[in-house]
Image (cartoon, grey):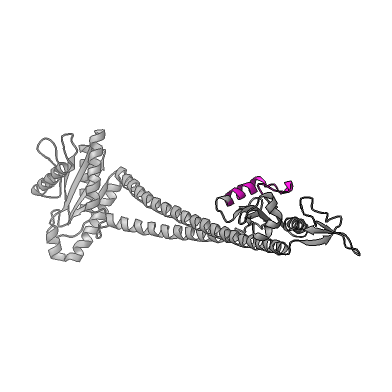
């Protein structure tokens, strides 16, 4: 049973290797889906960011347009109220007007109007914007750390600056304010020059969270379906491989192991015997006068006879740790691990008797006109330098059995081959 167990182990190892390939394929499939999901998430976030940027640019452009309108008019006047007090940072001779029949008016320049609009927007809408500068006239317009970073970037030719804090769900945008001719009316006294960056306007607003559920759900579903399909197909492939592997190891006619399987395991068993110094035996058997049987009954009957003999030898081998294989034509071979000469001879004799008791009619046979089997036995010896030498001794013993009248067992030894039980 040892060799059969070894064959099963080797087969399981081969299946394990192929299952390993299936596992690698599954991992590659998962990585592919994860990469696809990450790419789609990036694209979705990029699209959201592009939309937020578009909104921020539009809002910034609107504020700049209103400021330009104010500057082109030289400022606008509005009645002084508790919410609209004169601008203390506006140094001009006509800051207030005193109409004879109306309320006192104060001048609202672009910067002051920007602050007023920002306060109203923060109160009425979810939008916050403010004007800031590195050198503000009004200290309240002093740039924050983020705005300072943006303003310094503008001095390095940056056209805009923005960040999207997805945890805080806030998009913040800033673009520079360039000094135009209409701006110099107020700012020339502070050293401003045409086309100089005077500061910037920052715009911030809340952003809804990016809904990743459709992407995660669809990719998870595709991944699950793919893995299930891969498992099903993989199991089918493994099953198909197992069938092909089994067929490749079996003789097509007799369904015992074939010559290729025997050769591979003979070498393995030989190396194992050398490594552990444990004997094993090889029994080579040949159906006596089989050509005459074929000539008399035909090849179909001959094939049927070989199938019956193979099944019989299989039963004998199943009671040991060995196995039987078809060596070629009407020859069969048994490998018996951990088996010395006396035990090997006994098993060979069981095989010979079992075939004879089949009582398959053969007029050209040896024992009362029945099909018989001659067998040669070789025992591993430390002096054997290769498996082929051991097999050659078994073949020589089989030849001696044939020469000694057939239907007998001959065991090879270091001494001249011993002939046993020949009729």
Q: In this view, does 119 lie to the left or right of 394?
A: right
Q: Quadrant of the N terminus?
A: top left
The image quarter in which residue 416 lies: top left
Any part of residue 363 in sight: no
**Percent position of residue 114, x then y:** 73, 57
Residue at the limit of the structure toward the front, as seen here:
93
Number of dots carrying numbers: 0
The image quarter in which residue 53 lies: bottom right
Whether residue 141 appears in magenta in the rendering, the answer is: yes
Which residue is more in the foreground, 38 or 25? 38
Residues in magenta? 133-154
Q: Is residue 416 left or right of residue 81?
A: left
Residue drawn at the location 69% of the way across and 48% of the way down: 136
**Percent position of residue 386, x then y:** 17, 40
Q: Where 190 sits versus 50, above or below?
A: above
**Percent position of residue 90, x then y:** 76, 53
Any part of residue 57 in sight: yes
Which residue is more in the foreground, 255 or 320? 255
Which residue is more in the foreground, 194 or 108? 194
Q: Is residue 12 left or right of residue 55?
A: left
**Percent position of residue 326, x then y:** 22, 53
């Amino acid at each position: 049973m040892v060799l059969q167990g070894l064959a099963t182990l080797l087969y399981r190892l081969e299946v394990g290797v192929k299952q390993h390939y299936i596992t690698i394929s599954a991992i590659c499939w998962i990585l592919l889906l994860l990469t696809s999901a990450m790419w789609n998430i990036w694209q979705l976030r990029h699209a959201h960011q592009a939309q937020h940027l578009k909104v921020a640019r539009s809002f910034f452009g609107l504020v700049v347009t209103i400021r330009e309108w104010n500057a082109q008019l030289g400022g606008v006047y509005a009645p002084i109220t508790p919410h609209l007090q004169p601008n203390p940072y506006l140094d001009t001779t006509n800051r207030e007007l005193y109409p004879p029949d109306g309320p006192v008016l104060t001048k609202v320049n672009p910067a002051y109007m920007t602050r007023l609009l920002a306060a109203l927007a923060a109160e009425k809408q979810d939008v916050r914007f403010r004007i800031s500068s590195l050198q503000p006239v009004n200290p309240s317009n002093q740039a924050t750390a983020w705005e300072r970073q943006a303003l310094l970037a503008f001095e390095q030719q940056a056209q805009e600056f923005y960040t999207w804090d997805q945890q805080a769900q806030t998009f913040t945008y800033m673009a520079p304010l360039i000094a135009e001719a209409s701006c110099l009316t107020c700012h020339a006294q502070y050293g401003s020059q045409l086309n100089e960056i005077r500061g910037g306007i920052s715009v911030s607003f809340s952003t809804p969270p990016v809904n990743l559920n459709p992407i995660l759900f669809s990719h998870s579903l595709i991944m699950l379906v793919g893995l299930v399909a891969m498992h099903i197909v993989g199991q089918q492939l493994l099953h198909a491989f197992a069938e092909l592997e089994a067929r490749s190891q079996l003789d097509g006619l007799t369904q015992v192991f074939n010559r290729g399987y025997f050769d591979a395991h003979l070498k393995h068993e030989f190396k194992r015997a050398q490594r552990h110094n444990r004997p094993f035996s090889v029994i080579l058997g040949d159906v006596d006068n089989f050509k005459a049987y074929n000539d008399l009954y035909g090849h179909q009957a001959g094939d049927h006879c070989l199938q019956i003999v193979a099944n019989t030898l299989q039963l004998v081998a199943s009671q040991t740790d060995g196995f039987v294989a078809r060596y070629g034509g009407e020859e069969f071979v048994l490998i018996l691990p951990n088996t010395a000469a006396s035990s090997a001879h006994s098993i060979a004799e069981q095989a010979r008797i079992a075939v004879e008791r089949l009582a398959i009619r053969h007029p050209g046979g040896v024992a009362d006109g029945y099909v018989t089997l001659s067998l040669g036995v070789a025992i591993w010896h430390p002096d054997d330098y290769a498996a082929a030498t051991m097999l050659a001794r078994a073949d020589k013993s089989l030849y001696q059995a044939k020469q000694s009248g057939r239907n007998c067992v001959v065991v090879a030894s270091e001494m001249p081959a011993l002939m046993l039980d020949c009729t």
